Image: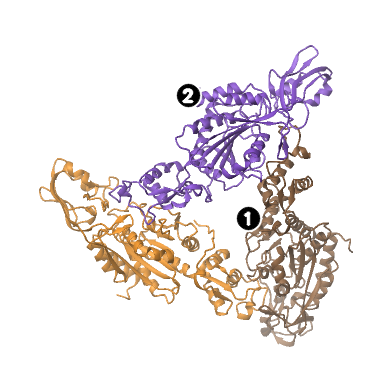
Chain colours: A purple, B brown, C orange
Amino acid sequence: MEQASFKEIVDDLFQELFPICRSITGNGIRESFKILRKYLPLELHEIPSGEQIFDWVVPEEWNINDAYIMDLNGNRLVDFQENNLHVISYSIPVKERISFDKLKPKLHSLPDQPDAIPYLTSYYARDWGFCLSEKQLDKFDPSAEYEIYIDSELKHGSLTIGECKLPGTTKGEILLSSYLCHPSMANNELSGPILIALLYRYLSKKTKRRFTYRFYIGPETIGALVYLKMRGKLLKERVLAGLVVTCCGDRGRFTFKRAKDEHAWINQIAAHVVNWSQIDCNILDFFPTGSDERQYSSPGFDLPVASLMRSMYSQFPEYHTSLDDLNFVDTTELLETMRVYVNLLESLEADDKYINCKPHGEPQLAKYGLYPTIGGQKTKKKFARNLRFLLCYSDGKTGLLEIAERAGVPIWDFAEPVALALENGLIEMVEGESNTSPMHVLKIKST
Amino acid sequence: MEQASFKEIVDDLFQELFPICRSITGNGIRESFKILRKYLPLELHEIPSGEQIFDWVVPEEWNINDAYIMDLNGNRLVDFQENNLHVISYSIPVKERISFDKLKPKLHSLPDQPDAIPYLTSYYARDWGFCLSEKQLDKFDPSAEYEIYIDSELKHGSLTIGECKLPGTTKGEILLSSYLCHPSMANNELSGPILIALLYRYLSKKTKRRFTYRFYIGPETIGALVYLKMRGKLLKERVLAGLVVTCCGDRGRFTFKRAKDEHAWINQIAAHVVNWSQIDCNILDFFPTGSDERQYSSPGFDLPVASLMRSMYSQFPEYHTSLDDLNFVDTTELLETMRVYVNLLESLEADDKYINCKPHGEPQLAKYGLYPTIGGQKTKKKFARNLRFLLCYSDGKTGLLEIAERAGVPIWDFAEPVALALENGLIEMVEGESNTSPMHVLKIKST
Amino acid sequence: MEQASFKEIVDDLFQELFPICRSITGNGIRESFKILRKYLPLELHEIPSGEQIFDWVVPEEWNINDAYIMDLNGNRLVDFQENNLHVISYSIPVKERISFDKLKPKLHSLPDQPDAIPYLTSYYARDWGFCLSEKQLDKFDPSAEYEIYIDSELKHGSLTIGECKLPGTTKGEILLSSYLCHPSMANNELSGPILIALLYRYLSKKTKRRFTYRFYIGPETIGALVYLKMRGKLLKERVLAGLVVTCCGDRGRFTFKRAKDEHAWINQIAAHVVNWSQIDCNILDFFPTGSDERQYSSPGFDLPVASLMRSMYSQFPEYHTSLDDLNFVDTTELLETMRVYVNLLESLEADDKYINCKPHGEPQLAKYGLYPTIGGQKTKKKFARNLRFLLCYSDGKTGLLEIAERAGVPIWDFAEPVALALENGLIEMVEGESNTSPMHVLKIKST
């Protein structure tokens, strides 16, 4: 399995993870973690029900075996075995015969999307209910009675989160965060954890990592809060950039949601990468609704966490319905999203600061074989031009991203000039934390 | 009278004030102050002629009883009793028979506006002259002689200014300044003092004022200089924002002239209010010609004083002529201008800074009844969105104006989220001066 | 000769300097300096071959007497006596009979410009070669042998640079730099040194100079490095603005290449001058290829040096070919370039900071005869408006350039208001270094 291709990993994980009924606690999420750990060596933490997490309390653990609505002839009109979205997550157990009139307020459908089953939850208020398509609802007899049954359990248990790290040569960290608490929906939210697994695989194979990479997966909101309680102080000290990995497997155009601090490094890098790799990407200012970036960006932490998606949550019609299924996602598209993530991470890795070792005038480049010996030719020398930008701006304070923007070329075009300038002793990398901070504020135009 | 409506106040003041012959000193301005004090409890100060005011000296007091130009048949061709604009303000007394040739240089008309009598003054050079319409001028006989008569008096006296205050819960002040030295002209300048009276009435009825409001009215230029000599040091310490209230009763579009410091709070607030209330407003950078903002913005004081007008002084053809009469202004329009002033002042009042009391992650909003308990619904919740912006950005340094701009909504949409967040202990207002300074520099796009 | 007109100087220098075969060392450059010194009292420095200059070494001195390629019938197909571009600069001596096949790699032509002889050099690698037009190349017989002859000499000698200064009332310096190492080419590079001579003449006749002007001319690159080794520390302390004067005699539109620091004073001045004098000018961000601004802008010096050109080097087809001859340049155009340089320098001179001596309110301008005594007239008074901007913004920190930009007029419109305000004791000039630093950062829109 270790040698599986990225494509094989995606297909395997989608197939295995999709059918499971997950919620923010319970055996569904534990089983899902077990599957994910084939590719991503998450260390799991169990946090007991009732534990205070800032303004919140870890809820009781929820599990469910079966649920249905049956007419008096024994026909199951709504059946949890067919689709786990049919039961509102965290529904309390129920078993009774009830008139349609009394049942009606407990039935949730989407009149505008008659084929779709909506996804609803009631984590923090004891309640129950069924979700069904408008077409299913039409089949009910208003004058009839129905047998309803929810075989669920709410009890003291625990909430599960997972984390792992890949060490780098410096203590600065890049946080990659996703969540795993949705039942059978593919884009939101299996695509996020799956992409995290791919990025782990990719990064683990790099011979050198400048940064430490921290991977976190847990239930949305409450999981991130638990993780912040556990690691928040450390994250505040170390995280240089973070990304919430979500909604990344559909066919839509890209969406980059900026980190809260508009000058954050990840925002600059993203603007640069989007600009120079010509991906079709909608760049949005931060807003405190959405996913776990809300918790990371709360004023007590203010971590520089952005999010790169394809179609953004809430903005596609399949969102939070049964239409977000395995047909809605596409492996090729997920791998394309991975490519952009890799581009972002590699650009972060490349954005070093250098200091020119021969800062008085230009070095005599020809001496080092870095310039043609017969001068005056009109030939355009992209390499020499980039090398000159590197030397001219490497004052120990200006990072490679800013130099690339000034040169009007992508940061990856500097790989060769940097390598040769280092090799010839023309530049040295700035040591320690001043290599990554403070950032110069660049105004990169973005779409 | 105390219970008069705003409309009744406007109509009453225009009718009473318009006929009076005012100048920068004298009984006309004293009589005008007496009328204004029915609605605005100004404390008056008399400054004696000859007193040194920075680079200036308070001039002698000027009063006038009568003036005319009569032909030798006893017909009054120009008569001060018909229109007090006919005499150049501060004209010295004259009584003589004179040929048209000698009279001609003392007659001022506007060839391009043949029906209009221009408004001219000669405060600081002893002179005399008549203003008349081009049509009146045409009736003179170039070969005839005329009796001219100006029954005026220049003598040691005093200059009158008025001020009053409405206290607030903090020492920071908002300065509302206008001037009262023009004879019978309605927009420039009766609309200004009348609007000051309305704003006093409005603000005095508020149950709570964050700021102290300071109202000043006096003759243009010399009055503002006198007031700055008297109160300049205090104003420099306390004034957070100021507005010169002038030219605000005509039917033209709005004009906002920025305070000198482009980042001044009043400039930010005005850009926000103009933008979100969709008023048709021309926003101009500060320039040191115009009205009393010139004195407030001199480098010795540099107070953050802007000006909100309708048609700007010098820019409408009726300006400084007899055409600026009671037909040129309109009570409904003046009340519309008041509405925008109130919006500006209420936005200043609302632009507080708050600190999130539960800054680690989001508070559990459902616990406080501030969020629906069944999650996942697609319903858009404007209230919850604004509440989240409030909580996410309330770090004690970011004001509500900036938060509103980030949320892309007007500051008044935050009234309910702020009230409920305060009530539930989720935020606290920042105490003392750090609530109003220093401002974050927001770049609000403006029309 | 001292009384020669600018036009006569240009014509004289072009005629005398053009025929000389210059290189980065040798008698050609010495002879050229001798001619230039008729108008520009350069002090010359000779730096011996072998001296270490930062990462470089002063090369051996190169001189050449004759060179040709002759067929076996004694016909000279390529003759140095006809055009000194025919020999690659710094070619070692050669005399041999050689087959066309072996000669071919040593022949350089431009297939796209069949009439042009290219200009090539090999300063730092011992080599030789001929440059010729494509049409000349076509006349060679591929099967024939040729006599080749280069009568050159490379020996220990010295490299020559020249400098002179015009003192000002302050120590702050303006650097005017050009280079002189190209053989017979007119725009690049005789136009630069000739314009330097004109600017020296112009500036030497000014009765008062605020700044010290430093004029430098030497061979490109190595000369600037020598000069920086000799004077770099002093330049770093004193240079407030600099310009590389090059490519300034052709008929193309103007090009301004910004200094490296985007907020540099010279960049602000140039944006202002270009904007208000409506010259057709392409303004480019700094880039570290080009001419000697590369050395001045290296991180060890970081001098604020820009460059004003007509058609930019490398961007016109005649560049570095025999087509850059006396027909390609035009005296009238060079004088037009001079006019823009003078405008830039005069604007630098004028950009003083003043302090308002009567800062509390406006002074009573009429007292000083600076305002009409009868007020209220609609006449627009440009003078009075500029005077008010001057008084209102003269806080000792805001320079005249910023005031002019705020007033929306060119800095030269302030000459009269400044003179009269100084004369009447309304303002005083700020003394010492705080007059020129630190700059306020103005965002001047530019084309």
Quadrant placement of the N terminus of chain B: bottom right
Relative to B246, is A351 above or below?
A: above
Task: Give residue A409's quadrant in the image.
Answer: top left
* Image quadrant in which you'd find residue A295: top right
Q: Nearer the observer, disc 1 or disc 2?
A: 2
What's under tag 1, amino acid-wise? Val
Q: Nearer the viewer, residue B372 or C237?
A: C237
Question: Which residue occupies 77% across, 31% down?
Answer: A125
Label 1 residue SS? loop
Q: Residues within 10 Å of mark 2 (few under 14, many from 20)?
A: few
Q: Which mark is residue A180?
A: none
The residue under label 1 is B441
* Left-right relation of A186 to C134: right
Q: Is residue A406 visible to us here?
A: yes
For the point 51% across and 23% down, the residue is A8
Work out whether disc 1 and disc 2 sit on a shared chain.
no
Residue B67 image position (x, y, % from top left)? 77, 81
**Which residue, given by chain and number where applicable, does mark 2 sit on?**
A3
Q: Could you say which is closer to the camera, residue A11 or residue C21?
A: A11
Chain letter of disc 2? A
- Name the amino acid type tagged 2: Gln
- Residue B171 location, x and y as percent? 75, 63
- Label 1 Cα crowd, 10 Å radius (few <14 / some 14-19 / many 20+): few
Question: Is any part of residue A245 visible from this angle?
Answer: no
Determine whether, in the image, residue B76 is placed left or right of residue C94.
right
The image shows residue B238 at horizontal and vertical percentages of 72, 65
For residue A131, which quarter of the picture? top right
In 3D space, how far apart are the residues under numbered discs 1 and 2 (Cα atoms)?
Answer: 54 Å
**SS under mark 2:** loop
